[in-house]
Amino acid sequence: MGSLSRRRVPQAAGGVTPDLGDQITGGVVWILVYGKFYSLFALLFGVSFGIMMERAAVVGKDFSKRFLWRLSLLLLIGIFHAAIYRGDILTAYVLIGLILPALYRVADRWLWTLIILLMLGCGQLLVYGLAGKASFLPWESSPTSPEVARYVEVLKHGTFLDVVKENLSTGLAHKFDFLFAIFGRAYMTLAYFILGMWLVRHSIVHNLGDYRPQLKRVLWISSALTVIFFVLMMIAFIKMPDMTQFTQWRHVLAFSFYNYFNIAMTLVLGSGFALLFLRAKGRWKNALAVYGRTALSNYILQSLIGTTLFFGFGVGLLGELHDWQTVLLALLIILLQIKISGIWLRHFRYGPLEWLWRCGTYRQWLPLCKSAGMEAQSIS
């Protein structure tokens, strides 16, 4: 939903004039989605890594090497995805996930030390202190910069190959800058990976119902911190003429408050959802389950749908819709995907990409149809 709403380009680059609906929608999405959902996805990625390592250990095996092989396969999917959509996260997950096997047996006290340092923004602060600037890129990336206008022009009027070439050149440069410069997405992602792994290590994921009091405590404390950091963030940003420019340390401090606000809000969303999930029964819980079981396929499908609808080689809606319209469109796509995922899983064991990834991971043809009873055939 957040990715789709970003399809509204700056007015200076040919976008529609924002209206009141855009301002309201942008505020809601900015508070609830931007900087929060990637955190939840990263947390779940760490959980999945911990579960795979745990299950392999039960039968006396080490999953580390197979996990690295699994990441190499994910990299292939990520490169394809990055070629069509600059906002791909799979390639970033591969790069950051490579360190997880080395951290798996590290003692809790060192893991939590690393989590806290990363979440405090030590990585970003170190980069800014050494480089003296917020970005490694030789060009400006603000919404009004010529580089953004040029990129929008490619998306609006370029061919499919033009978009691919742009995404695999300057697009990758932007991605690595976003990961490792002042925005520090890589450092935060690693922190959530480790936190997810820790939740499995202590069986919290497996026995979530036993932790209702702790979840409620996390919800209330994180709610209070969300309000505190939101106020501090707004006070700091009000005094900044341009929040994308980091010319002084006070700008970095303001952005740090934004990161802390995102962390607190992520904990609100995560703990709140967990409490609702424990109470939930019936259809909507099953709907989320089928959507989660086909998450990779739906993630790639969303980008295929979005680029076809918005980019110039497709329908060309980029710059033509308001934020509130794109969010409604996103919700419609999500609902359709949930419905289709449910129908698909009535007949098949896995989503299509999940199945291919699983077969590649174990180097075996695994049954896809639920009615199939054939033995897995080796393809190694």
Image (cartoon, rainbow, N blue to C red):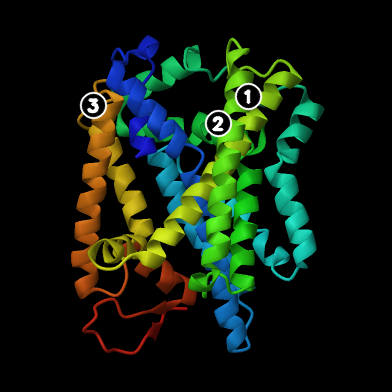
Residue 237 vertical placement versus 179 (above, below) = above
Residue 316 bears which disc, if any? Answer: 3
Residue type highlighted by circle 3: Gly
Work out which quarter of the rendered image holds the N terminus and state it: top left
Please state if 5 lies on the left or on the right of 332 as rendered: right
What x and y, as percent, mark residue 243?
A: 58, 18
N-terminal-most mark, 1 or 2: 1
Residue sitting at x 54%, y 73%: 51
SS at mark 3?
loop
SS at mark 1?
loop
Q: Quadrant of residue 32?
A: top left
For disc 2, the marked residue is 174
Q: Gap in Å between the C-alphas at discs 3 and 1?
A: 29 Å
Residue 344 vertical placement versus 36 (above, below) = below
Residue sitting at x 53%, y 57%: 216
SS at mark 2?
helix
Q: Residues within 10 Å of mark 3 (few under 14, many from 20)?
A: some
Query: Is residue 184 among what the camera can see?
Result: yes
Q: Quadrant of residue 160?
A: top left
Q: Are marks 2 and 3 in contact (CB under 8 Å)?
A: no
Residue 171 bears which disc, if any? Answer: none
What x and y, as percent, mark residue 133?
A: 72, 22
Q: Are marks 1 and 2 in contact (CB under 8 Å)?
A: yes
Residue type highlighted by circle 1: Leu
Q: Gap in Å between the C-alphas at discs 1 and 2?
A: 8 Å
Residue sitting at x 68%, y 44%: 119
Residue type highlighted by circle 2: His
Query: Is residue 134 among what the camera can see?
Result: no
For disc 1, the marked residue is 137
Please state if 157 lies on the left or on the right of 194 as rendered: left
Please state if 222 lies on the left or on the right of 87 as rendered: right
Q: Residues within 10 Å of mark 2 (few under 14, many from 20)?
A: some
